[in-house]
């Protein structure tokens, strides 16, 4: 398959998802997952509430360490909010994001494949929850290790150089997308092909080896939706000091919406790809 054919295929995948976006029923798994994230965010900004403090404090103390005492004060809460929210979001993701992706894959499979009973596939996705959880945990663990190790390796090189930090940030984001693109097909393959965790990962690696550049852009295109909010949130100290601290909360809220779009379009495009490859 030549470059132009692959480009047309990539465009067709996302056009197919865009055309399906008006089908509200395709959105509900990731929408409910986004609601869970929104509830978590609201709980965090209500941290000082006496009824919530005792429940949230152990988690906040674990994540923030000695800085946890600032989380109950203004504007310290908004300085620490992105990091604490992200760790909670990570836990929610391990438990629920794989399931949401599997259910959405089932709904897209029913939408793109004529004659397939969507209810049967959705039930099948629920039955595969342990497999979806393990596959998503495996992918998440790799990305978390990447996010933990690389910044530490280059920390001394980056200190005191905003230009190097900016360049590193761009390269690091692209590297994260590249690593994710290796496993982008794994979770949907569990539902669409009915594969086990290990076989779905092998399938994803196989597709990546066959279409490396194609897979990279398949992951990159929707990821770009989340870049503005994720970039701004990492500058929470500047936002708090020069603008309104509450803006951090609204940026995180926008980030949840951006992630909803990224997950929806990525899952839909991957499912369409898997169907095309099986025909």
Image (cartoon, grey):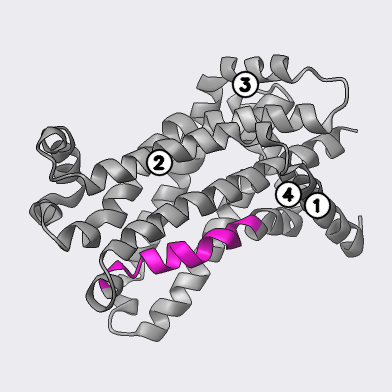
Residue 163 visible in the picture: yes
Quarter residue 91 falls in: top left
Q: Quadrant of residue 111?
A: top right
Question: How far across and how far down the image is residue 9, in percent?
Answer: 86, 53
The answer, for residue 184, to whether it is visible in the render is no
Q: Could you tell which of marks 2 and 4 lies nearer the N-terminus?
A: 2
N-term-proximal mark, 2 vs 1:
1
Of callouts 3 and 2, the N-terminal one:
2
Callout 4 crowding tier (Cα within 10 Å): few <14, some 14–19, many ≥20: few
State left or right for residue 209 relative to residue 164.
Answer: right
The x, y position of residue 65, in whole percent, is: 13, 50
- Mark 1 element type: helix
Q: Nearer the viewer, mark 3 or mark 1?
A: 1
Image x and y of residue 246, in percent: 28, 62
Q: CA distance from mark 4 to mark 1?
A: 24 Å
- Label annotation for residue 37: 2
- Per the picture, the main secondary structure of the magenta-coloured stretch is helix
User: Secondary structure under badge 4?
Assistant: helix
Give the foreground label among 4 and 1: 1
Residue located beneath label 1 in the image: 15
Q: CA–CA distance between discs 4 and 3?
A: 27 Å
Q: Which residue is mark 3?
A: 125
Q: Tell me where the magenta segment starts and ends, as one range.
A: 222-237
């Amino acid at each position: 398959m030549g470059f132009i054919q692959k480009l047309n295929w990539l465009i067709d995948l996302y056009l197919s998802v865009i055309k399906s976006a008006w089908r509200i029923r395709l959105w509900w798994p990731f929408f409910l997952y986004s609601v869970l994230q929104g509830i978590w965010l609201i709980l965090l900004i209500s941290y000082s509430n006496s009824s919530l403090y005792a429940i949230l404090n152990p988690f906040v103390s674990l994540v923030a360490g000695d800085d946890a005492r600032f989380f109950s004060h203004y504007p310290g809460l908004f300085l620490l909010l992105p990091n604490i929210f992200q760790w909670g979001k990570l836990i929610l993701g391990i438990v629920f994001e794989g399931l949401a992706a599997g259910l959405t894959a089932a709904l897209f499979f029913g939408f793109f494949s004529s004659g397939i009973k969507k209810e049967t596939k959705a039930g099948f996705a629920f039955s595969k929850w342990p497999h979806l959880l393990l596959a998503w945990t495996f992918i998440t663990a790799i990305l978390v290790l990447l996010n933990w190790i690389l910044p530490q390796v280059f920390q001394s090189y980056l200190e005191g150089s905003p230009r190097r930090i900016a360049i590193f940030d761009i390269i690091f984001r692209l590297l994260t997308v590249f690593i994710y693109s290796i496993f982008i097909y794994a979770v949907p393959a569990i539902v669409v092909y009915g594969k086990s965790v290990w076989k779905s990962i092998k399938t994803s690696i196989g597709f990546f080896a066959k279409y490396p550049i194609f897979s990279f852009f398949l992951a990159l295109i929707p990821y770009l939706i989340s870049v503005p909010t994720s970039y701004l949130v990492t500058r929470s100290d500047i936002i708090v000091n020069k603008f309104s601290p509450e803006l951090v909360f609204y940026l995180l809220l926008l980030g949840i919406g951006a992630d909803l779009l990224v997950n929806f379009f990525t899952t839909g495009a991957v499912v369409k790809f898997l169907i095309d490859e099986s025909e």
